[in-house]
C-alpha cells in the first residue's frame, strides 16, 4: 500500500517541523549503506546538528565493515523511529551521503556534540581504541506517523492526541 492509501487507516505524513522535532529528541537510529551483497545495517547513536547533518562516532578496530562500507558509499540512508504504542509512533527516513570528518574539523564539531547517550560497550572501547567522526549529510527527509486510534476504533470518549 502507498502512504496515501494508509492515511485512511490513521497514518499521516510528517511535515518539516515534525521531522525536525523527532531528530532533535531522538539519539539512536539505523544506518544503511550499500555493499556488494545485502546492505549493511547498523544501529547507531547520533547527534543532529539542527540543520542538515547527523554525526556518528565509530570505534575503528582492525577490520570494520561499517568503516569500509561507509567510506565506499556514494549514498546512504538513516532511519530514526519512536514507537510508544501500536497507535502512537513516528518514523523518519533520511537519504544522503556519509563521509569521515577531518581531524581539524572534528575538534570543532565535537565541542558541540551532545554525547549524553551511547551504548556502554562503545563508550569503554573508545577509551582505548581509535575512533573516527562521520558526518551524514541529509539530502532528503521524509516521515510518517500515527498519533491516535484509527477512525474505525474511535469512540465518543476517545480523544485525539495532538502532535
Image (spheres, rainbow, N blue to C red):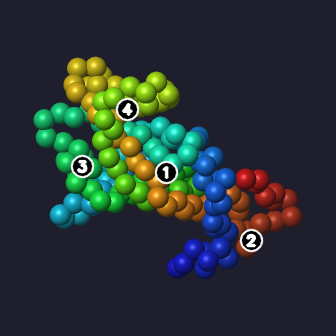
Mark 4 element type: helix
**Above or below — where is 134 with respect to 1?**
above
State how far apart marks 4 and 2 are (Cα): 50 Å
Horizontal side, residue 138 vs residue 20: left or right = left
Q: Which mark is residue 55?
A: none
| Residue under pointer 1 | 80
Q: Earlier in the sequence, mark 1 or mark 4?
A: 1
> Which circle, 3 or 1, is nearer the viewer?
3
- In the rendered image, which residue does mark 4 sit on? 105
Q: Residues within 10 Å of mark 2 (few under 14, many from 20)?
A: few
Instruction: Answer with the quarter of the image where residue 2 lies.
Output: bottom right
Q: Secondary structure at mark 3?
A: helix
Q: Would residue 107 be visible to someone looking at this image?
A: yes
Label whose residue precedes the other's in the sequence (4 or 3)? 3
Q: Earlier in the sequence, mark 4 or mark 2?
A: 4
Q: Residue at x 46, y 24 (%)?
A: 111
Residue under label 2? 151
- The image position of residue 161, as x and y in percent, is 76, 54
Q: Which residue is mark 3?
A: 71
- Please state which of residues 119 and 67 is positioned toward the viewer in this rendering: 67
Q: Is residue 102 above or below residue 91?
A: above
Task: Identify the element where label 2 is drawn.
Answer: helix
Amino acid at each position: 500500500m502507498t502512504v496515501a492509501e494508509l492515511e485512511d487507516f490513521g497514518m499521516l505524513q510528517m511535515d518539516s517541523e515534525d521531522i525536525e522535532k523527532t531528530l532533535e529528541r531522538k539519539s539512536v537510529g539505523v544506518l544503511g549503506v550499500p555493499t556488494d551483497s545485502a546492505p549493511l545495517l547498523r544501529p547507531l547513536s547520533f547527534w543532529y546538528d539542527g540543520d542538515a547533518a547527523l554525526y556518528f562516532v565509530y570505534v575503528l578496530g582492525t577490520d570494520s565493515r561499517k568503516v569500509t562500507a561507509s567510506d565506499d558509499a556514494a549514498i546512504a540512508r538513516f532511519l530514526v523511529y519512536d514507537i510508544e504504542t501500536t497507535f502512537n509512533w513516528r518514523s523518519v527516513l533520511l537519504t544522503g551521503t556519509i563521509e569521515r570528518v577531518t581531524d581539524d574539523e572534528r575538534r570543532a564539531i565535537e565541542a558541540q556534540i551532545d554525547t549524553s547517550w551511547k551504548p556502554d560497550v562503545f563508550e569503554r572501547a573508545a577509551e582505548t581504541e581509535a575512533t573516527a567522526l562521520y558526518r551524514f549529510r541529509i539530502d532528503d527527509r521524509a516521515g510518517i506517523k500515527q498519533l491516535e486510534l484509527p477512525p474505525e476504533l474511535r469512540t465518543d470518549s476517545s480523544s485525539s492526541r495532538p502532535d
